[in-house]
Each structure stands twice: as structure tokens, then as C-alpha cells.
Image: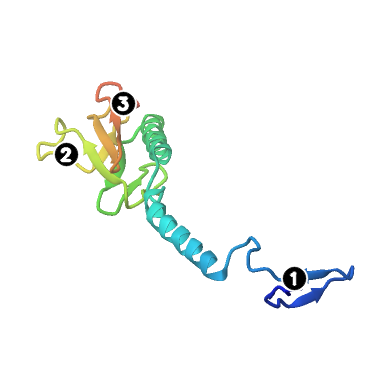
Amino acid sequence: MATKDHKALPIMLNKTGRSDRLRPSEGGFTLLEMIAALAILAIVVSIALPRTGHGTSQTQLRAFAYRISAILANDRYSARHRGTMVSTSIDTSGHRLQSGTTGSWLLIPADINLSGGMEPTCSPAGLLPDIRFFPDGYTCGGKVRLETEQSHIDISINRLTGSVSLVD
């Protein structure tokens, strides 16, 4: 009888006493395959991550617009209630707006462009960087614009009524 030539594989006995032969054809991944897959995944994540929300979202932009509207409406109310002029200051270079009533500053993120002020009807030199409310509740009007790369929101102050409204 001819004997078949078998390659000797290491034989390991498990707890049940059966032999577990190590077979090169068993399924699984090598360490090199795992490292390559993780490297590809890291490249995909590094490309996709900068495109996802590091800037101000539309919802956050709208929230800032509502906060500015509330500050303006409060300053208008305070001017009427106190019987004195109240001025809301806009610092475009510092990305902030100051309430004339409380003196507190609302800080605007750097990726939002803040612009606006009083209409030229009250200031012959052009747009002043503040909104003034008079004791009778009127104002010269004005606007504040919040703008990102994706969108913008205007806050309009009616010069006759002093009312504050959002314009998309």
C-alpha cells in the first residue's frame, strides 16, 4: 500500500479532548487586512468630517436673529416706559450687539457677518452703527443683517412704528 504524504500540522487538544488542527484555509482577517481597512476608514472620515457642521447652522442663525429682535423690542419698550432715548449699539468688527437698556453684550460667532444700523434718514453721514428708540416709541428705522456663507436673515426696524420683524 502506498502511503499518502501529508503535511504535518500542529495538533492542539481543547478541553473536550478533541484535536483542533490549525488550518490555513480557515476564515478570518489578517492583521494587515485590518490595518488597511482602518486606514481607508480614517481617510474617508477625514475627508467627510470638515464638510459637516463646524459652522453656524440655519437654526442657530435664526436663534441669534430672535435674540437680537428681543433686545431691540426690549430697548424700544424701555424708551417708551422710561421716557428717554435708548440706543442699541452694533459693533460689527467685534461681532457683538449691546442692549441700551441693560448694557449687556450679545456675542455673535465669528462665522456670522453682522452688519446694519440706523437708516440714513436720521443720519446724513450714512448708516450709523446703532439703532435709536425715542421716548414716544418711534425710531428712525434701521436694519440688522446676520449672514453666513449659506444664508442670511435681516431684522428690520420700522421707522414709523418702531416694530421689529424678521425678513428671510
Name the one closer to the observer, 165 or 51.
Answer: 51
Disc 2 secondary structure class? loop
Return the residue at label 1.
Answer: 21
Q: In which quarter of the image is residue 17?
A: bottom right
In the rendered image, residue 149, in percent from the top left (x then y), is placed at 28, 43
* Cα–Cα span, label 2 and label 1: 85 Å
Q: Is residue 103 left or right of residue 143?
A: right
Disc 3 secondary structure class? loop
The label shown at residue 70 is none
Q: Residues within 10 Å of mark 1 (few under 14, many from 20)?
A: few
Residue 140 in sight: yes
Q: Residues within 10 Å of mark 2 (few under 14, many from 20)?
A: some
Return the residue at label 2.
Answer: 127
Pointer 2 or 1: first along the chain: 1
- The residue furthest front is 1
Return the residue at label 3.
Answer: 162
In the rendered image, residue 58, in percent from the top left (x then y), is placed at 39, 38
Disc 1 secondary structure class? strand
In the rendered image, residue 59, in percent from the top left (x then y), is placed at 43, 37
* Cα–Cα span, label 1 and label 3: 87 Å
* In front: label 1 or label 3: 1
* Residue at x-position 27% and y-position 37%: 145
Q: How crowded is mark 3: few (under 14 residues within 10 Å), some or many (20 or more)?
A: many
Amino acid type indicated by mark 3: Gly
Q: Quadrant of residue 25?
A: bottom right
Q: In which quarter of the image is the C terminus?
A: top left
Pointer 1 or 3: first along the chain: 1
* In front: label 2 or label 3: 2
Q: Is residue 126 left or right of residue 10?
A: left
Amino acid type indicated by mark 1: Arg
